[in-house]
Amino acid sequence: RRVLFRSEKGEFTELCADTRSDAAHCGAKDQACAKGEYCYKSQCKSICGDDLDTCVDSQGRHVCVDTDTSIAFCGSCELGNECKIGQRCKEGNCACEDGYELCAASSPAGADACQDTQNSRQHCGACGNACESWEVCNSGNCECPAHLDKCDGRCTDYSGDELNCGGCNQP
């Protein structure tokens, strides 16, 4: 449909556009809707509706996102607001599941990740606190496996050890 517009100088110009549905002229001449919006009844509306945000992913695509729960866009549509491995997005904040802690990568090629510090041999009781190779992590403590006892800093089987027969340092 043709619409007449009045310029700032008071001159009328004719435009062939439907200001009720044209995203470039939504409601008025040259009043464009933002990316990710469409024109409906002369008002710009989000393609995602009222409950979701329109975000742009790393490939430049518009995606509808709940930034309160999205792992890729946690808290906002900013690229880089992605949660780390094992985290979830709760109320717009990245967090590890209960009982887990975000620990730094153990190698330069690795990524930060949520770790079970109550049972992880590499992060026992706290991030980066590794148990010895013969120990297990039990409730956040490095200990000997159930059938062994600690003697002089090592796990020992008293029933079959000549130097520790029946107890620590008892030959």
Image: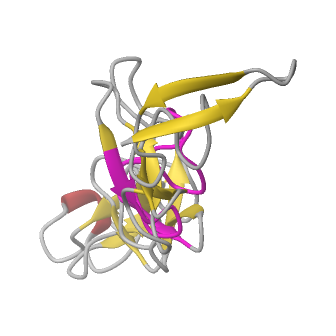
Residue at far left of view? 160
Quadrant housing the C terminus: bottom left
Kindly report the secondary structure that dominates the magenta region of the rendered protein.
loop
What's the residue at 36%, 43% (across, down)? 1
Name the residue nearer the viewer: 156 or 39. Answer: 39
What's the residue at 45%, 55% (across, down)? 20
The magenta segment is: 63-90
State whether residue 128 is above or below residue 131. above
Name the residue nearer the viewer: 23 or 13. Answer: 13
Specify whether 24 is left or right of 170: right
* Residue 128 coordinates in the image, percent (x, y): 53, 44
Name the residue nearer the viewer: 49 or 157. Answer: 49
* Residue 19 coordinates in the image, percent (x, y): 48, 46
Magenta-drawn stretch contains 75: yes
* Residue 82 coordinates in the image, percent (x, y): 45, 44
Whether residue 83 is visible here, answered yes or no, is no
Marks counted in the figure total 0
State whether residue 72 is above or below residue 65. above
* Residue 158 coordinates in the image, percent (x, y): 24, 74
Name the residue nearer the viewer: 139 or 170. Answer: 139
What's the residue at 44%, 50% (across, down)? 54
Whether residue 38 is visible here, answered yes or no, is yes
Magenta-drawn stretch contains 50: no
State whether residue 146 is above or below residue 66. below
What's the residue at 44%, 74% (across, down)? 97
Residue at far right of view? 9
Specify whether 110 is left or right of 148: right
Q: Which colour scheme is used?
A: secondary structure
